[in-house]
Amino acid sequence: MPMKPAKRGIKVWMLCDSRLEYVYNFEPCCGKKDNVPRSEKGLGYDVIRFLCSCLKSTGHHIFFDRFFSSVLLMRDLLNAGQYSTGTIILNRKYLPENIKEFKLKTAGESKCFQCIETPNLTCTIWKDKREIALVSTANTYTIESTKRRIGGNVASIPCPQTIRQYNKFMGGVGLADQKRQYYDVARKSYKWWFYMYRFLINTAVNNAHIIYTLTNMPNLKRPMNLYTFKMGLIASLIKKTCGLLSPHQLESFLTNMSV
């Protein structure tokens, strides 16, 4: 995937919390030879519905990009009690045929289209450096403002609330990927399964760190960082499996590891 930061390797679809980077669900992408049963509604539709199947309560707001977005997906998620917002290509099915005829000329200009059959479903087009189109089932057409640098000066231009909300909450998967690289347990290998093993270990440890800081840290201003948590986890595992080590030997061993 040339547009992604990591262009090569095994792709894993993930559902992550946009604020905590907690990974709720994931699915490895196996390419065209994928043996997972798929519907006729498209790969993006099936991936999102599978990832969201772990959500036991309703009222969540799910953000995704144009690879997954479709009007049918938005409707079905809304019927299941989940809200959604995503960028979309204007030639997708069930969008108005004349929607591409509206050309926005100036930065900050926008248009909004509302579905008659599903009033909660809207399509918003906004002009920044180029036109950006989003579909959403969670926002009304409310105009706010955003900062842009124009000719060396910072100016405030109109921006729909849908666009601002999407930019604010879309980065959960990227943040989870970034956090997974911190103090990675990776070792070079030509075996595909070793990547998945490493992915599972790092994801489990990061999720455990998030839960620990939320439930065991009375002083949230100075929560335990990931490095300290991982070193504590290593010490706990060594004590459990190598009980012959004295506390002094264990401290010396961990100090040498961290150098």
Image (cartoon, helix red, strand yellow):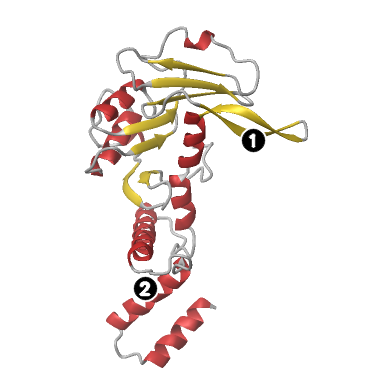
What crowding class fits label 2: few (fewer than 14 Cα within 10 Å), some (14-19), or many (20 or more)?
some
The three-letter amino acid code for the residue at tag 2 is: Leu
Confirm whether residue 86 shows in the render.
yes
What crowding class fits label 1: few (fewer than 14 Cα within 10 Å), some (14-19), or many (20 or more)?
few
Q: Residue at x 49, y 83 (%)?
A: 255
Horizontally, residue 109 falls left or right of residue 207, namely: right
* Figure quadrant of the C terminus: bottom right
Q: Is residue 190 above or below residue 243?
A: above
Calculate the distance from the C-alpha at mark 1 to the C-alpha at mark 2.
44 Å
The residue that mark 1 highlights is: 147
Q: Position of residue 171 (x, y in %)?
A: 47, 43
Q: Secondary structure at mark 1?
A: strand
Q: Residue at x 22, y 33 (%)?
A: 37
The residue that mark 2 highlights is: 233
Q: Is residue 24 above or below residue 131?
A: below
In this rendered view, identify the residue nearer to me: 134 or 23: 134
Q: Secondary structure at mark 2?
A: helix
Q: Position of residue 91 (x, y in %)?
A: 45, 15
